[in-house]
Amino acid sequence: MEYEEAKQKLIDGLTKKTKSKSKFYFSDLADILEMKPRDAKKIVNQMVTDGILEFWSSGSTSMYGLKGMGKQAAAEHEA
Amino acid sequence: MAFISSGYNPDKPMENRITDIGPKNFEDFYPPVIKNNKAKWLYHEILKPGVLVHVSETGDEVYTVRAGGARLMTVDLIREICDVADKHCSGYFRFTTRNNIEFMVDKKDKVEPLIKDLESRKFPGGSYKFPVGGTGAGITNIVHTQGWIHCHTPATDASGPVKAAMDVLFDDFKDMRLPAHLRVSLACCLNMCGAVHCSDIAILGYHRKPPMVDHAYVDSMCEIPLAIAACPTAAIKPKKIEIDGQQKNSVEVNNSRCMFCGNCYTMCPALPLSDKEGDGIVIMAGGKVSNRISNPKFSKVVVAFLPNEAPRWPSTTAVIKKMVDVYAKDARKYERLGEWAERIGWERFFEKCELEFSHHLIDDFRDPAYYTWRQTTNFKF
Amino acid sequence: MAKHKTPLLDQLVSGPWPSFVDDMKQYAAARAKNEKKIEYQIPVDVVDDLMGLLELSYADGTTHWKHGGIVGVFGYGGGVIGRYCDQPETFPGVAHFHTMRVAQPAGKFYKSEYVRKLCDLWEFRGSGLTNMHGSTGDIIFLGTQTPQLEEIFYELTHTMGQDLGGSGSNLRTPSDCIGQARCEFACYDTQDLCHTLTNDYQDELHRPAFPYKFKFKFDGCPNCCVASIARADISFIGTWKDDIRIDQEAVAGYVSGKFKPNAGAHAGRDWGPFDIVKEVIDLCPTECMKYENGKLAINNKECTRCMHCINVMPRALRPGKETGLSILVGAKAPILDGAQMGSLLVPFVEVNKEDGYQAIKDVIEAIWDWWMEEGKNRERLGELMKRQGFQKLLEVTGIKPVPQHVKEPRHNPYIFWKEDEVEGGWERDVTEYRKHHQR
């Protein structure tokens, strides 16, 4: 799958789910992309670099979300 | 205070960005005597508490002076370490896994001036900046976590109880009178970001009250599915509640399933759990990581709860001191605390250490619990 | 004059052990004075406010920190931990107070020149408070504000050649024991292996794609000074295959009392004269040693390399020359399903610097492939091993089962035979069967 196509697929998949939550585990992203983790990682990394996705970390666990989405940004006064 | 740029351009974060370069190369920091003798060491000896000599097949020797330190350090104290290193060790020093500072010199006559310098440096309140010790069959520095100074889920402080405990154990930091070395560790909650679960003595912060639910704010501050997913025991469920006639989304905590880990609070600040009466300390004992003589062992819970008694945690330090002293008197040479407890039997351990046994100390958490019950008629009265 | 009264903390300045309170108080005063005329990039009274906040915790027995997960440096999913104070009006200096993890050099060796630069940077752009070191091994920069994160990262990478460490669902900054740099027991170069793998796996360290945290730790011998066997998802523990090297003359030196046993570790008490039979031979867990007619003999084939005899007589005994390491996997602290010790996966592998440690990397990458595919969210490797079984681990790593893999064989006969392991397979003709067996 080309990057642009994968990117759109992931954005669509995440947007559909953002009504209830905005942060996702890496495996959720790999599932949406229907890719092996190592291949999915390449797409996800690129989307982070392109400013489409951002990380969220609990310190012990990491999650991903569409940039600026979700309640944490406001709660952390970083929005 | 004007903002001073490092050269980073926030509009173009990828411009000239350097990433993935890793840590500094250790070889840049080896003192010459280490570089010249790496993998050539023949043997070592502890000359006195805190002082080691390693002898190389080249005939070279390296003398190490080990000093304790609080792992919470200001840059001014680190600069003072640098001063000592510059003066005595051509600028080289290292840290041990257990937060000690090691100064290395290549001649025996450099040792005493170094020790004298280290021991002469004191804080205004009288404590040593760099107490020399922490070797051999004694007690070395306590490894620990952040506690109240910087963590969001601690059930106790870390730096404070460590300071209090090391003050009480100080003689054993400076001495080597124990049957074997004894490792003390502290983790300020059960998540154990400082893995204390294989320590001779572990101080563990523990919450005992489930999170409160700040119903009016759960939905506005948190993403409810994430809070639910954060719970390792599936104790959190979504719940609709009514506040001032308004329907709000919130959650409900099944208190009897809560293991007090605080993971939900990490995801959702509307679920706070810390509490003065609820929070305190669990004492564990008898773990080890070395494969020497017996296999590595997990620490066992020997005191289910002690209150947080800031600033010096006297009940906690008293239990630790008692265990150390009984072990010192009773164990055989080379026997670690856990090996000693197993040889005499845990029933005798509780008796000798004057610790009360309660139902809290019998494992009831999932399958491994069964293997800790006594399945023999061999026990002591 | 201190900004906040701290009567409880002040009780921790006394006593012999280094007082972090005194250190902070002195430093807070130095910041206020600012003799070096530093243009502090975060509030000058940050340390005062931190002490005030800690004093509040000492009084009310609770923490005043909230977690924040968004902050970080661009493109990295780890290395920064967000922290916000829940009393920002009273303690504005620490309202935003994020941690940065800075990757420590292998062996935690330092030179002052470099460390002073780190201190200057952190004083200028942060609180000036550190942990030397965090539990995993990183240098911890304790407390700065969001706009400084990228600036610090830029200066670290551009002027100091220094990267951040790991946090979150990443490979965590690997750490090692002092190893061959200054320890005669070390069976391989822990620093080189630690440093090489840390650098080879930078992507895994900075960009989270694992189900949860993952730790490497490197111990040069079975004494396990960095506790790899208890806390690393993969522990690399030095060992050897051939005979323990014996210097009989030095043995005699210990027996005669010329050398102190255990390198002098027990010198604080009079344990009586050294008794080689009682203290070494009889404590050997495999009973593979003899001391007869003034000669020490070891039946090396039966030795499990526990290190006791070598620890007691380091001048006389040395590990063999055919050295390598054992790989144990799956150790973790108790959360959630109880603590797990590392389980032996590779009894022995050569440590080959020349080919970039390929044999070791093959094992690591096979494990990662399995765990990334099969691991549930927040499931450590040890828990996946429990869920899918040790046999599965052997299958994915292509390692042949050997008795060394178990403490003892299974207690139950419930073997889940696979069809291709059973002669003739599972497809059978029931009509044929009924020819000889009535219904």
Image (tube, grey):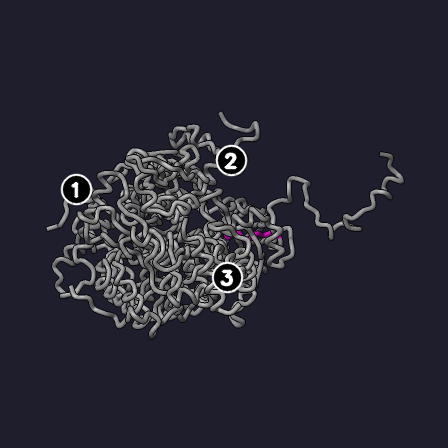
Nearest to the eye among marks 1 and 3: give it.
Answer: 1
Packing grade of label 3 (10 A; few <14, some 14-19, many >=20) is many
Q: Are marks 3 and 2 on the same chain?
A: no
Q: Residue at x 14, y 45 (%)?
A: C5
Q: Report helix, strand or loop for mark 3.
A: loop
Q: Which mark is residue B282?
A: none
B320 over C86 or under it: above or below: above
Per the image, the residue denoted by label 2 is B369
The location of residue B172, given as percent across then percent down, is 33, 45
Q: Amino acid at mark 1?
A: Pro
Packing grade of label 2 (10 A; few <14, some 14-19, many >=20) is few
Per the image, the residue denoted by label 3 is C187
Q: Amino acid at mark 2?
A: Ala
Quick one: label 1 or label 3, which is nearer the N terminus?
Answer: 1
C56 over C239 or under it: above or below: above
Q: Residue at x 54, y 37 (%)?
A: B367
Subunit bearing disc 3: C
Q: Quadrant of residue C106?
A: bottom left
**What stretch of residues is rendered in magenta?**
C302-307
Per the image, the residue denoted by label 1 is C7
Q: CA distance from mark 1 to mark 3?
A: 51 Å
Q: Report helix, strand or loop for mark 2.
A: helix
The location of residue B206, given as percent across then percent down, is 36, 39
Subunit bearing disc 1: C
Which one is in front, B196 or B31? B196
Q: CA distance from mark 2 to mark 1?
A: 44 Å
